[in-house]
């Protein structure tokens, strides 16, 4: 079954829809190919006007888990799916990167996960104490894939009670049902990633660090999280004002 996905505004769209981000990225790559070809001496009578082919990109909103939303999700979680969602919440990895994680990519000795991610870029994720607690008990579940599920009933060649690797469609359905049971609205799976990025930036104030942690090719993508520093900036400016005010009051006045 073709499960509808959600766009940045939480609206349903068909999975065959091509986002503005994809169109613009493809256009940019084609522009680079033309530029390189011209550097090699090629000439084009009708080179596209690249600016005319760019689409307006919707403003990406950053959504964190609020109040007791995380606890409500945990309370409604299927036991066999809990490690997958816990890993997504702790790691900030993309959904497909989580689903395709293999044991060969988990290096216990180096305490690091290394795998190919979006755009073929290497994802290097440290195995923190939390991530180790999630992954270590799963080692005997499947010889290749890290995340599996227990089949609820025998059908389609799958046997009830046996474990099989998670699938994209299966996790979409499970996530939709989980949110409904937990009463959590407007929180997409991708927001687990935003949640990690936001908390990292709030903790460190370092955009470059967050860029590396989330494996963003361009730091411009990471700047969507910069709003979390607004309160810190306001507090710092207030502190400077207070110090300046105290200094001006303590400065002795010249005798007239």
Image (cartoon, rainbow, N blue to C red):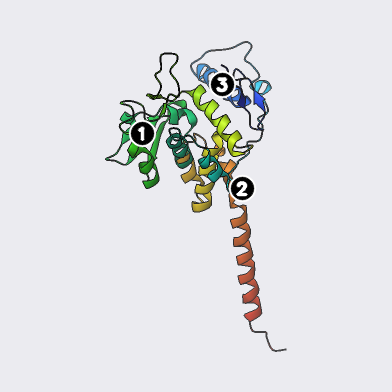
Q: CA distance from mark 3 to mark 1?
A: 27 Å
Tag of residue 216 = none
Residue 169 drawn at (x, y percent): 51, 22
Q: Nearer the viewer, mark 3 or mark 2?
A: 2
Residue in view at x 46 percent, y 26 percent: 119
- Find residue 210 and report its horizontal and vertical position in percent: 49, 44
Label 3: state its secondary structure: helix
First of labels 2, 1 by sequence position: 1
Q: Quadrant of residue 15?
A: top right
* 84 left or right, relative to 50: left
Q: Residues within 10 Å of mark 2 (few under 14, many from 20)?
A: some
Q: Are marks 2 and 1 in contact (CB under 8 Å)?
A: no
Secondary element at tag 1: strand
Q: Is residue 171 above or below residue 62?
A: above
Marks 2 and 1, how far apart in space? 30 Å
- Which label sits on residue 227? 2
Report how far apart the C-alphas of labels 3 and 2 lie in the structure.
Answer: 28 Å
Identify which residue is drawn at 60% across, 47% down.
66
Dot 3, crowdedness within 10 Å: few (<14), some or many (≥20)? few
Which residue has dot 1 on it?
114
Q: Is 168 in front, or is 243?
A: 168
Residue denoted by label 3: 26
Q: Is there a contact, CB below 8 Å, between mark 3 and mark 1? A: no
User: Whole-percent x and y of residue 46?
Assistant: 64, 12
Q: Say which of 39 and 156 sits in front.
A: 156
Q: On the picture, is 102 further left or further right than 55?
A: left
Residue at the limit of the structure toward the top, as seen here: 45
């Amino acid at each position: 079954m073709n499960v509808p996905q959600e766009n940045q505004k939480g609206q349903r769209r068909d999975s065959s829809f091509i986002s503005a981000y994809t169109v613009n990225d493809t256009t940019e790559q084609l522009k680079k190919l033309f530029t390189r070809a011209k550097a090699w001496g090629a000439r084009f009578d009708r080179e596209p006007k690249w600016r005319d082919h760019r689409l307006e990109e919707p403003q990406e909103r950053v959504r964190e888990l609020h109040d007791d939303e995380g606890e409500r999700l945990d309370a409604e979680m299927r036991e066999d799916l809990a490690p997958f969602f816990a890993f997504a919440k702790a790691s900030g990895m993309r959904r497909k990167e989580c689903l395709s994680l293999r044991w060969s990519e988990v290096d216990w000795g180096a305490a690091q996960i290394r795998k190919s991610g979006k755009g073929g870029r290497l994802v290097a994720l440290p195995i923190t104490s939390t991530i180790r607690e999630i992954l270590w008990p799963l080692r005997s579940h499947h010889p290749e894939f890290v995340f599996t599920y227990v089949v609820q009933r025998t059908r389609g060649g799958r046997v009830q009670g046996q474990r099989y690797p998670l699938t994209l469609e299966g996790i979409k359905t499970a996530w939709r049902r989980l949110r409904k049971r937990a009463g959590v609205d407007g929180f997409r799976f991708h927001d687990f990633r935003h949640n990690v990025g936001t908390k990292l930036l709030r903790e460190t104030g370092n955009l470059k660090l967050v860029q590396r942690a989330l494996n963003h090719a361009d730091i411009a993508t990471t700047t969507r999280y910069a709003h979390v520093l607004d309160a810190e900036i306001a507090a710092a400016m207030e502190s400077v004002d207070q110090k300046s005010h105290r200094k001006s009051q303590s400065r002795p006045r010249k005798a007239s």
